[in-house]
Image (tube, coloured by chain):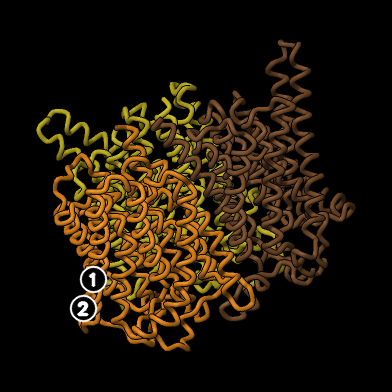
Chain colours: A orange, B yellow, C brown
């Protein structure tokens, strides 16, 4: 019990650092929105954790009081979804809208897990692995209901300093991602940690390489590094504890990084303008696509592993596929509806001219215009 | 033993991160004083830890060599008092004064704990919980002996960037506070962690809410978030391991946050001008008032818990009350005397015009005036 | 096994934070090179870890799959050498050169350990303690092949803000150094942690004191604090688990700090100009000299401890001395050769005018000249 408690509380803290500190600074890349990025992130995380604990108690009542620590850790893990979604609408929502979005999203996320459990017999900790996927597609659907900023907006920009703040957050996410994935692992937590590390390591190397190859004059682009270095962690989340050889994790890390950087080009040039989505911090290619890849990899790896046992194989594959299709569908539909709700006049929607602007929400000591 | 050692060293490190890193950046909110805030904090912490270990060995000799790790961890915990006090006189003391203050404060803090133990039979780790209270009131008493800066001082100001540095420190304190409180817990460390987390979560939400309600045009004020988000951790420190239901911790977190924000108005407008105290970083309402609330809550919760056992109840309440009254009195009186000592000419007191100024203590590469 | 696993993964993470986060920001003190400092550090660390694991598997094959976690942790530890070497040529190498240097250095480091093991019967984890020494002298030898920047270069300078970023990294290194040394400890990890802490604490105090005493007008110099506060950790690395009394660790910390600050004067004024070495971030006095001191201290302390057992004493002393002499010689010679290789035209060496410049490697959102 002692050892268990000690480990659980440690993982709880690691997840906490990730969601509070990592995401807070990861999203602080807009030059005039760093107060809101770090501050509102704290606000919605702590609010969401409380909601999440209530929902978990309501929907999964068999979890007794003994397992209390686990519930709280899981609540912190599920906050990743909210942090990711808030990234998709970064700078466009006021705190009231963010709070409504947080509460709605957390409720729907747990309901979606409950549906997966009731109808597809998916275990609790497996359905929890959809947290990135759910967050990304929910956020995207919400952001489709917000108008685009004017392309020449001065405020929707970064400075070297704000990129550096974001690098701080990225490095925190990077370093604590192995812990995050090991929280979701059921049996072999140590394996989950090292597989995640390998995937992240290859991701980071690939991110630098591809960035040089894809930019005009062979320079690195900071946003590539930020998003693609983390892609391996997202992808390997599903399979971290079941991968037996490090090289499989490394290939997944490589693919994740490739899909992220190619995705960032395709989405920003083709899909987003077509669908009129403005994905403020690129959550689609940072968390959405690598998450999809991870879910597919999970199916493929399970098929390879259980090739001989033919009868239940087709059934299992179908379950897995319906599992993540269901999750994405629920995320997209409810995200769209949430986007509509957030635009009710009651919530004091902010005009496009006030997007990406700290001064709208925070008192400033002196009106320091250029941060 | 292995498990014990592992846990102890981990908590030691968490406390270390809090005092070295958290407080260092928490106090870095002055635009021209960030070198000194982080640098001097490192200096006084490492100096104080060494003093504290000597004092502990002198006053509580029964702690044998076996328990060495615990002594060092406790020494790091007791440094919180010094870090808080140094916040009260932030920018007004030179390093020599800070060092003298650190040594005097640590000696007095341990003597005060020794008195509590000898005369009131208070256990070592309970008297250690007064660390915030002691630090705040000692610092306030010291700061009453320093002249106020001119209200129009350019230097006693923050920029968005220095606020962001302070946010970095605040988030570190926030994330590691549960560990801090669990170090002081005797039996149920896991419970202490989760109760502290709940209190902090509610504090943070309340901080944002009250900040909007109390400022003129409904904006957030960064200093409110910084101080009130941490208030719950201070308050629940006394009772973290004895609270059986999370909602009690949550109510304490709510009250702590309310008392901090209301306190910041009352103190800055009424009490401080009357007493001619200039509380440079608001330690009175950030650590003092929530600490008081925590001490009172400890008495109330003990009374409720042991209602039936009437004979010893009155005695116990009296002990608790005299315990924290004694601690505050000692802190105030000795702090006042220390303030007088610090103003001896021998210590090269700095003129008011040199307050809040890094360039007075640090070599600058180029004379970069506007940081 | 559970307890073991838990501890190992925790130390793995601590070392990770140190090398990824600590060194990344520690080296971010140049005003126009913070993207490269943090970004390239991530790149070479993750690349090097993968190389290191391959080399370890090749040269020390007896380490079976069971001990996998330990290999990865050791790979992360050995990255310290690369991070230190990259500090010596900071701002003068392009990413391609850095990658070549990383791969060559890691291979040579492991070969040097293998030689130590084969010919001097030095244990794996003892030869790993030369990591700082090897990194520093390898880096110095490499940097001797790079031309000096013009002394009036605007770019080879720091701003208060970049110093503050470096302070962030320094504090991270400082706080996690005890964990780092305990990873290399074989038996008594707890002792290693506390001895390292004491050495670091004394180092930090000495750093401030000597800085005041040695600068012209009695001010603190930030670079003194950055390098000398860490010196104790480097020195005590060799003996952290075998020191029985804290005061020995404290004296080593004091000597390390003294040697660092005096070294920084002597080297920068006498040795470096004579040898035409430009040590960009002072790795010689920050890691090299304290490392030497630590190696000597190890010999002296072993001699004192085993004074009575005369027969093997002389032999043991000789082994120790040849061990670190061999390591330094290998580092210097191969570093020199590597420096020659790095100046092949194939690697697109950068002109002196482009030294210390982020814009050469990174896309900038807007051409923000003054960071």
Spatial distance from mark 2 to mark 1, Cα to Cα? 9 Å
**Residue A4 circle label:** none
Q: 10 Å neighbourhood of mark 2: few (<14), some, or many (≥20)?
A: some
Residue contact at pointers 2 and 1, CB within 8 angstroms? yes
Q: Where in the figure is residue B71, as x and y percent of width and height? A: 46, 31
Labels 2, 1: one chain: yes
Q: Nearer the viewer, residue B253 or A355?
A: A355
Snapshot quadrant of residue C239: top right
- Judge left or right: residue C355 versus residue A106: right
Q: Nearer the viewer, residue A268 or C88?
A: A268
Q: Chain of mark 2?
A: A
Is the residue C15 above or below the residue B186 in the image? below
Is the residue A275 above or below the residue C34 in the image? below
* Point 23% across, 35% down: residue: B318
Q: 10 Å neighbourhood of mark 1: few (<14), some, or many (≥20)?
A: some
Nearest-to-viewer mark from 2 and 1: 2
Q: Which image quadrant: the C terminus of chain C?
A: bottom right
Q: Where in the figure is residue B8, as x and y percent of width and height? A: 43, 34
Q: Chain of mark 1?
A: A
Q: Nearer the viewer, residue C76 or C237?
A: C76
Q: Which residue position is annotated with label 2? A: A341
**Residue A100 circle label:** 1
Q: Where in the figure is residue B299, as x and y percent of width and height? A: 22, 41
* Point 17% across, 38% down: residue: B303
Q: Where in the figure is residue B29, as x and y percent of width and height? A: 50, 63
Q: Which image quadrant: the N terminus of chain C?
A: top left
Snapshot quadrant of residue C43: bottom right
* Element on which disc 2 rests: helix
Q: Is residue A76 visible?
A: yes
* Element on which disc 1 rests: helix
């Amino acid at each position: 019990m002692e050892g268990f408690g000690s480990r659980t509380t440690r993982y709880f803290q690691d997840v906490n650092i990730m969601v509070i500190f990592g995401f807070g600074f990861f999203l602080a890349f807009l030059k005039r929105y760093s107060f809101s990025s770090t501050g509102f992130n704290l606000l919605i995380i702590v609010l969401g954790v409380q909601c999440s604990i209530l929902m978990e108690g309501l929907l999964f009542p068999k979890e007794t009081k003994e397992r209390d620590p686990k519930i709280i850790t899981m609540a912190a893990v599920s906050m990743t979804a909210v942090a990711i979604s808030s990234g998709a609408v970064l700078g466009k929502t006021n705190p009231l809208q963010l709070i409504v979005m947080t509460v709605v999203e957390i409720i729907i996320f747990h309901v979606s897990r409950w549906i997966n459990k009731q109808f597809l017999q998916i275990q609790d900790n497996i359905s929890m692995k959809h947290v990135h996927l759910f967050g990304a597609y929910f956020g995207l659907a919400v952001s489709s209901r917000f108008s685009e900023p004017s392309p020449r907006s001065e405020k929707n920009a970064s400075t070297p300093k704000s990129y550096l703040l974001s690098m701080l957050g990225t490095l925190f996410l990077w370093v604590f991602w192995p812990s995050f994935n090991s929280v979701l692992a059921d049996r072999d937590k140590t394996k989950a940690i090292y597989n995640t590390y390998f995937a992240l390591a290859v991701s980071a190397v690939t991110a630098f390489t591809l960035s040089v190859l894809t930019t005009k004059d062979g320079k690195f682009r900071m946003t590539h590094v930020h998003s693609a270095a983390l892609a391996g962690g997202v992808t390997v989340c599903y399979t971290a504890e079941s991968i037996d050889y490090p090289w499989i994790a490394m290939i997944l890390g490589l693919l994740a990084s490739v899909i992220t950087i190619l995705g960032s080009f395709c989405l920003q040039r083709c899909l987003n303008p077509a669908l009129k989505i403005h994905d403020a911090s690129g959550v689609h290619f940072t968390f959405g696509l690598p998450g999809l890849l991870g879910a597919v990899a999970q199916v493929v790896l399970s098929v390879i592993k259980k090739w001989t046992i033919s009868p239940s194989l087709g059934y299992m594959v179908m379950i897995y596929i319906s599992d993540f299709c269901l999750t994405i569908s629920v995320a997209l539909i409810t995200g769209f509806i949430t986007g509509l709700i957030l635009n009710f006049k009651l919530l004091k929607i902010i005009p496009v001219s006030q997007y990406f602007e700290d001064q709208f929400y925070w008192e400033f000591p002196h009106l320091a215009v250029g941060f």
